[in-house]
């Protein structure tokens, strides 16, 4: 058996030994957005450190646990699992460990993956506190999570990436934003390895490549989930303007502050979208 798949299955069994909750939607909560999980009707929590072989998040503001429960109210409650803290490539993990959590959520039953992140705005009409729906991505600057021997139990050797972000579910988010009077931006997201922020010259290059926002996560997770047949949607919280655009040095505190600023709007959009999926 492929050792990566074997490790994944050990994690699956480890979680199932702690809870039999079956989610429909998996949610990855990005930097500054982790408090969303506290709004769920929580049924169970599982710390990453208690899962056999699971990578542990070390990023600031990432609690490092799965939260199992329901999103919504009595009209419609959707079973979900939320990650309070993701694992990043810059933490030193192999890319297969970085995407292990989204693969795990699929194996636990999640048919939909709702990715969120904090990012730097490249496009001039993006400002701190904006929410941006991802319509495509640039993955060139990080290793593919599918590199190496293909795990046939998960997907095909050469998966198509023409429509990673599910168009039908993205339309649900668009309609939900309109109904809530939320001004939702749309754009292309580019992932860098991190942990350093980008240089102004790199930001100019990314703009030339067509990127609207830049961050250190999400793309690899979307690719791995899409490879497995998971329906993927993603929203980015613009936490700051990118290097060379922002007049001040970039900092992780900006990311946390932006998450707090947008928390109410983010919660409403994510909750109502999930209820409408």
Image: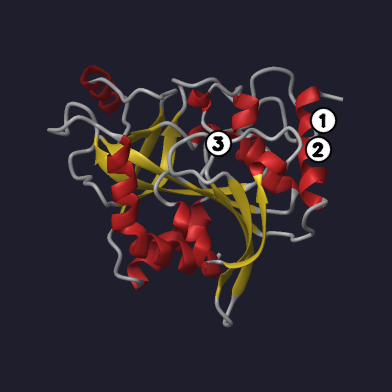
Residue ID for mark 2: 9
Residue ID for mark 1: 6
* N-terminal-most mark, 3 or 1: 1
**Does residue 42 show up?**
yes
**Separation of residues labelled 3 and 1 (CA atoms):** 21 Å
Q: Residue 211: where, in percent of width, then height?
A: 32, 32
Residue ID for mark 3: 57
| Residue placed most toward the observer, 56 or 129 | 56
Please identify, in this view, whether the residue under mark 3 or under mark 1 is nearer the observer.
3
Q: Residue 75: where, in percent of width, then height?
A: 57, 82
At 71% from the left and 43% from the top, the residue drawn is: 50
At 12% from the left and 33% from the top, the residue drawn is: 247
Image position of 55 with respect to 20: above or below = above
Q: Residue 116: where, in percent of width, then height?
A: 46, 47
Is disc 2 surrounded by few (<14), some (14 to 19) or many (20+) residues within 10 Å?
some
**Separation of residues labelled 2 and 1 (CA atoms):** 5 Å
The answer to which image quadrant residue 238 occupies is top left
Q: Secondary structure at mark 3?
A: loop
Residue situated furthest left in the rendering: 247
Q: Of the numbered discs in the image, which one, if any, rests on residue 56?
A: none
Image position of 45 with respect to 31: above or below = below
């Amino acid at each position: 058996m492929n050792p990566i798949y074997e490790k994944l299955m050990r994690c699956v069994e480890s979680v199932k030994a702690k809870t039999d909750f079956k989610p429909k939607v998996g949610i990855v909560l990005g930097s500054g957005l982790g408090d969303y999980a506290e709004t769920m009707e929580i049924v169970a929590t599982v710390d990453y450190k208690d899962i056999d072989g699971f990578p542990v998040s070390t990023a600031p503001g990432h609690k490092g646990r799965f939260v199992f429960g329901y999103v919504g109210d009595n009209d419609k409650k959707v079973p979900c699992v939320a990650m309070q803290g993701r694992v990043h490539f810059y933490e030193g993990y192999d890319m297969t460990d970085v995407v292990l959590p989204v693969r795990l959520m699929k194996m636990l039953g999640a048919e939909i993956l709702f990715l969120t992140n904090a990012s730097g705005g490249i496009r001039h009409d993006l400002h701190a506190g904006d929410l941006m729906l991802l319509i495509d991505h640039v993955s060139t600057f990080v290793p593919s999570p599918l590199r190496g021997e293909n795990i046939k139990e998960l997907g095909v050797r050469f998966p198509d990436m023409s429509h990673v972000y599910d168009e039908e579910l993205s339309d649900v988010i668009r309609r939900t934003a309109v109904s809530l009077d939320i001004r939702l931006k749309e754009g292309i997201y580019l992932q860098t390895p991190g942990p350093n922020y980008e240089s102004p010259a790199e930001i100019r290059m990314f703009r030339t490549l067509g990127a609207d926002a830049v961050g250190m996560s999400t793309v690899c997770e979307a690719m791995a989930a899409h490879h497995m047949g998971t329906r993927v949607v993603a929203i980015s919280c613009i936490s700051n303007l990118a290097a060379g655009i922002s007049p001040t040095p970039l900092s992780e505190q900006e990311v946390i502050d932006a998450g707090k600023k947008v928390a109410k709007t983010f919660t409403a959009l994510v909750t109502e979208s999930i209820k409408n999926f």
